Image (cartoon, grey):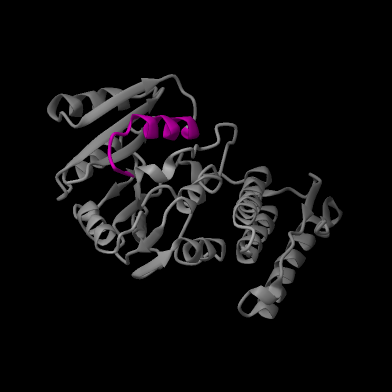
Amino acid sequence: MDLVSFLVPVYNVENYLGKCLDCLLAQTYPNIEIILVNDGSKDHSLAIAKDYQKKHSNIHIYSYPNSGISKTRNRLLKHASGEFVMFVDSDDYIDPDTVTVMMETLKKHDLDLVQCGFRMDYKYFTLYRPSSGRRIMEKMQALHALSNGRYLNNYPWGKLTRRSCFDGVEFPENLNGFEDTFTIFKSMAKARRIGTIPNRFYHYVQRRGSLTNRMSLDYVELMRKAYHYQSDVLNQEFPNEHFAFDKQYYNTDLVLIYTIIVFCHRDHPVEFTKDRINYSKLPAGIVLKLAYDAWLAIAKLKMGKSLCIREPAKNN
């Protein structure tokens, strides 16, 4: 039976770590190890981890000075011994049958990566995210689905991946956001076959202080850079294919405009450059263009002369 390594980055999660570790230890799939990298936590996270380690020999803890999430994930991969790996953030948790069902799917269809669905757990309610259904895709089909924003996502968690798909792949350690979008597609590009299952096994816990609860133009600009990076790398690696990221560019522009409307102040000058979006590649492209222009008009109304809007740079 193949060993599965759970990869858990730990940083100031004393209120969540116990629940995360309990869910991993409760997996119905028996052959697991739990790799914890403590990234210089200042609370009781490390002490909690050590208490669990005393009772469970398959928990391995490595502690370093604070270095950020990318270096922590790179260290997790280096310490993993399993044939398969699964990232689980230390403030999240998964259902008991997660690995059993995902491994059965992976073996049945000869996959290198399988992705499950997820739900977003808030304090008083749960938001069930749309399911990708049950799909089996060859590598190129999967990469096109990812570039089109369909079925597959860029999150590191919620995926059971053959460890070899991360050979030579590292999370960028010089960024402060969207490191996953710069990285996970590379592991998919090393897979032969990729699948999805409809089960929402992963519980993505929403809490104050998490990295996703911050918003600024510079931060969202990293999302745009990440998608352009994906496009450049994939089109260079597979020159006979054409990967269209127009949906991703469109959604990122809307997030940028939303950020201007909600978070920017009229007395602070703001520059916004439109991305290159081919609306003919999008379903209901005319409607989406009208929606885009309407959002931009609201931003203009709010910001006045403080907002400088530039047209997209022309392709070389």
Residue sitting nearer the eye, 283 or 160 = 160
Residue 104 is covered by the magenta coloring: no
Question: Residue 255's spot in the image, x, y percent?
Answer: 63, 57
Question: Residue 204's spot in the image, x, y percent?
Answer: 37, 51
- Quarter-of-image position of residue 74: top left
Q: Is residue 220 above or below residue 45?
A: below
Residue sitting nearer the eye, 147 or 163 = 163
Question: Residue 195's spot in the image, x, y percent?
Answer: 36, 62
Looking at this view, name the residue that lies furthest to the right.
305
Q: Along the horizontal axis of the image, is 263 left or right of 44?
A: right
Q: Which residue is drawn at the image coordinates 49% and 25% (left, top)?
A: 67
Q: Which residue is drawn at the image coordinates 49% and 30% (left, top)?
A: 68
Badge count? 0
The range drawn in magenta is: 69-85
Q: Along the horizontal axis of the image, is 41 left or right of 239?
A: left
Residue sitting nearer the eye, 41 or 154 = 154
- Quarter-of-image position of residue 35: top left
Magenta segment main secondary structure: helix
Q: Is residue 213 above or below residue 136?
A: above
Residue sitting nearer the eye, 90 or 75 = 75
Q: Along the horizontal axis of the image, is 3 left or right of 261?
A: left
Q: Note whether residue 131 is visible.
A: no
**Quadrant location, the C terminus:** bottom right
Q: Which residue is drawn at the image coordinates 36% and 52% (left, top)?
A: 159
Q: Note whether residue 13 is visible.
A: yes
Q: Which residue is drawn at the image coordinates 67% and 77% (left, top)?
A: 285
Looking at this view, name the residue that lies furthest to the front.
240
Question: Residue 170's spot in the image, x, y percent?
Answer: 50, 37
